Amino acid sequence: MIRLAACFDVAIDVIEPCGFPFSVKALRRAAMDYADLADITRHNSWEAFQARRQGRLILLTTKAATPLWDFSFAAGDTILLGRESAGVPDMVASAADARLLIPMPGGGRSLNVAVSAGIALGEATRQLR
């Protein structure tokens, strides 16, 4: 995810509890040399993130009815992804301005969260270029 954010020059917000080790050492190991290129903000809670958020919140979820391809992204949108195992809590889902799914005609249950982020970011970039 950090590599994706660095390569696309978009900020990445990590909201605690995030479900993975987020120490400086773990970040450096996982991000390789991309950590220095990425704009990473760590939020101690959902409430802290909400207090700083601007623009629409777009949630990717397998529980949505609107396909990613049918949505019009706008500058300033934030794409939100949850844990691969459980998604996001209900209170987070209810705060989203839009809930989108990535159609999977092959019949799979879900995609890796980083792959999903790349698909959504690619579509948003295509629309806004």
Image: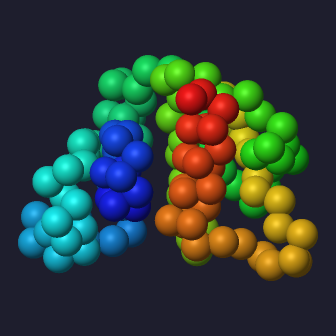
Residue 7 can be seen, yes or no: yes
Splitting the image into 4 quarters, where does residue 109 fall?
Answer: bottom right
User: What is the x, y in percent for residue 63?
Assistant: 79, 56
Q: In x, y percent, where is residue 37?
A: 20, 50
Q: Measuring 76% from the left and 45% from the top, which residue is drawn there?
A: 68
**Above-or-below relation of 7 to 11:** below
Instruction: Describe residue 54's horizontal placement relative to residue 121 as left or right.
Output: left
Q: Which quarter shows the N terminus?
A: bottom left
Q: Is residue 120 left or right of residue 62?
A: left
Residue 103: x, y in percent? Answer: 83, 59
Res. 45 in view = no
Vertical relation: 104 (above or below) 92: below
Residue drawn at 36 percent across, 24 percent down: 51
Instruction: Identify the residue shown where x is 89% and y is 69%.
Output: 105
Q: How is the structure coloured here?
A: rainbow
Residue 65 x, y percent position in the rendering? 87, 47
**Tag count in the figure?**
0
Residue situated furthest front in the rendering: 129
- In the image, taking residue 14 as reference, residue 80 lies left or right, namely right
Residue 124 quadrant: top right
- Between residue 110 and residue 75, name the one nearer to us: 75
Q: Which residue is drawn at 49% across and 23% down?
A: 76
Q: Please identify the residue farthest to the left as the structure is shown.
A: 25
State whether residue 117 is above or below residue 40. Answer: below
Quarter of the image that includes the C terminus = top right
